[in-house]
Image (cartoon, rainbow, N blue to C red):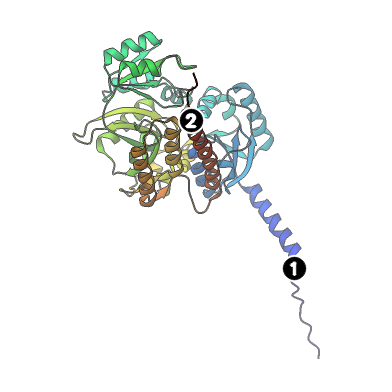
Amino acid sequence: MILAFPSFKRPSLRRRAQVSIEAKQERAAAQTSVLILGDHRQSLTVIRSLASAGFRVIFGSERASTVAAHSRFVSESWLHPPLLEAEEFVTTMVDFLEARGDVSHVFPVGESELDCLARHYARVSAHATLVMPEPQTVSVCLDKLQVYRRVSDLGLALPKTDSAFDLAQLLELAKDIRFPCIVKPRTSLHPFFGQKAVLCRTEEALTSSFAVWPTRQEALIVQAWVAGARYNCEFAAVNGRLVEYFEHKVVRSDRPDDLGVEVEGISVGPTKELQQSCEALLVDLGYSGVGCVQFLVNERNGTNVFLEINPRLDATCAFPWHYGCDLPRLAVEIAQGDKALDRFPGTLPRYPTSKRVHWCLGDVRGWLHEVKRGEVRVGPSLVWLAKIVASFLRANCHLTWWWKDPAPVVVLCRDLLAYAWRCLFRVSRKHTLSDRPVVN
């Protein structure tokens, strides 16, 4: 008797590849998409977090070439009109959302994106859930004068503060507050000489820095200079109540006067007074969403003063994310209506302390910028380079680097090398011209 066995013919490589492609397409079609707007440092963390949470990530930008778009977790890029052309931008985005149908959330990352969507909230929110605080909350937080009034009414410590509307008034107020003083814009939405704030130690420094009024700034804020370390309190809140909290101290910034962006930080345990001040302000605002409150802390006597509140993820949100404090994911959960406090634990989750974060590329770029300006001498320059190396070696995590997603950092390194070449060329040319003999 002859036994007949069934055939176990293996499918061809081409057929298996086709099946694999079809399976991937089916999974992609079943996924919910999120549109992330804004090419910022924290955009990478948002992309990585939400892709890990199961979202299909669409990255939107007004520039064709962006760092974040190189992330392996970006499924699709969307090029949109400039934010300055708000009507055209919003119309284009609404058309995009209507045509797609799979985009359930829009996540504005930076302040410009937040401001634009806050002004057109009703129109856009009819087509997708906006991952942001309420429009009125965003409006208040982006106006430092309004925030300072609320902080003062709550009885929280604040440096002596006033506002100027022209150059003459600016000088008068600075003299009244006394030097050294800090001058900052009322809103960071518009240019301010490429800086967050300006430290004026003398009247001459003030008149030199403000020979002209900064473009598109209605008012400038003058504050007394207060010595202290900057503490960042990153949070998620529901109706003003904290549901996540991560505190860290800024060790160094990318500027010698420490008024720049953070390049090195260290996590610290929750400071009771800072946490209570945060919650008092958030309750007053009725805040639901994620953000960051900053304080200046005098570590000798323990006193502190309020600095500012940002209605967005801090640029260093990769730091808490690395240790399980997933603020981007919490932002989505809160925005989609999960605002019942009983779904969150009664006590705030713990996080490890004494952990260090470093933004090496930003550190090097800050050093190059000061070298190009000729503002740093050889000795301090070498000290700065030594600090960069030490910070890199002792960091527990790095702001933009993640071994699962290396491409964006490769692009950043390429851009940094190009910037370094331009800086060194400018410095060498400057020395060459200065060495030429003067012909009478």
In this rendering, is residue 87 above or below 415? above
Residue 388 visible in this rendered orientation of the protein? yes
Q: Is residue 323 visible?
A: no
Residue drawn at the location 31% of the way across and 12% of the way down: 173
> Of helix, strand and loop, which one carries label 1?
loop
Locate residue 183, reporting x and y percent.
36, 20
Q: How far across and down, in percent of the image, does residue 182 sit? A: 33, 22
Circle 2 residue: 430
Query: Is 176 on the left or on the right of 360, as rendered?
Result: left
Residue 107 vs 194, above or below: the answer is below
| Mark 2 to mark 1 CA distance (whole Å) | 68 Å
**Residue 103 image position (x, y, % from top left):** 61, 38
Q: Pointer 1: residues within 10 angstroms few (<14), some, or many (20+)?
A: few
Q: Position of residue 212 (x, y in %)?
A: 45, 14
Amino acid at pointer 2: Lys
CB atoms at circles 2 and 1 under 8 Å apart? no
Kind of residue at badge 1? Pro
- Residue sitting at 29 percent across and 41 percent down? 270
**Foreground of the two, 66 or 42:** 66
Label 1 belongs to which residue?
11
Q: How many marks?
A: 2
Q: Nearer the viewer, mark 2 or mark 1?
A: 2
Check disc 2 and report its element: helix, strand or loop.
helix
* Residue extending farthest bottom: 1
First-in-chain label (2 vs 1): 1
Quick one: which residue is furthest to the left in this view?
301
426 or 113: nearer the eye?
426
Dot 2, how many residues are within 10 Å of its Cα: few (below 14), some (14-19), or many (20+)?
A: few
Of residues 258 and 43, the one nearer the viewer is 258
Q: Quadrant of residue 383?
A: top left
Residue extending furthest top?
Answer: 168
